[in-house]
Image (tube, rainbow, N blue to C red):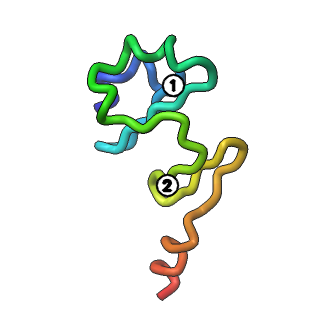
Amino acid sequence: INYILYKYLDIFIIAYLNNVLVYISRTLKKYKIYIKKLEKYKFYIIKIEFLGYIILRKNILVDLKKLIEIYN
C-alpha cells in the first residue's frame, strides 16, 4: 500500500500493512480533495486506537489492553 500512498506518507498519512491513518492538522476542506468516500471516515476524532497505541491530540500512549495480553 505504501507505493500507492507514497506521496502523502508522513505528510498526512501513516500506513502499516493494510492499516491506514489519515491525520490533518488544519482545515478539513484542504484534504477532502484526496478522499473519495467521505462516509467511510470519521473526522475530528480526539482519541483513536491504532496499531496497539492510543493516539490523542498531544500524546501517544501504549494501549494497556495490549500490554495485559502480552503479560498474560
Give the image location of residue 16, x and y in percent.
Answer: 38, 42
Q: Pick out the residue farthest to the right.
A: 58
Q: Which mark is residue 49?
A: 2
55 relative to 1 in the view: left or right:
right
Say which residue label 1 marks.
12
Give the image location of residue 48, x and y in percent.
Answer: 52, 50
Q: Earlier in the sequence, mark 1 or mark 2?
A: 1
Please state which amino acid type lies under the numbered disc 1.
Phe
Of residues 50 and 46, the one drawn nearer to the viewer in this rendering: 46
Residue at coordinates 30% horizontally, 24% vertically from top-left? 3
44 relative to 60 in the view: left or right:
left
Q: Pick out the residue farthest to the bottom.
A: 72
Q: How many marks?
A: 2
How far, Cα to Cα, is label 1 from label 2?
Answer: 17 Å
Packing grade of label 2 (10 A; few <14, some 14-19, many >=20) is: few
Please state which amino acid type lies under the numbered disc 2.
Glu
Q: Pick out the residue farthest to the front.
A: 39
Q: Can you say whether 60 is above or below 16 in the image?
A: below
> Are dots 1 and 2 in contact, CB under 8 Å?
no
Local SS, label 2: strand
Give the image location of residue 27, x and y in percent.
Answer: 58, 17
Local SS, label 1: loop
Residue at coordinates 44% horizontally, 20% vertically from top-left? 8
Residue at coordinates 41% horizontally, 16% vertically from top-left? 32
Q: Can you say whether 24 is above or below 32 in the image?
A: below
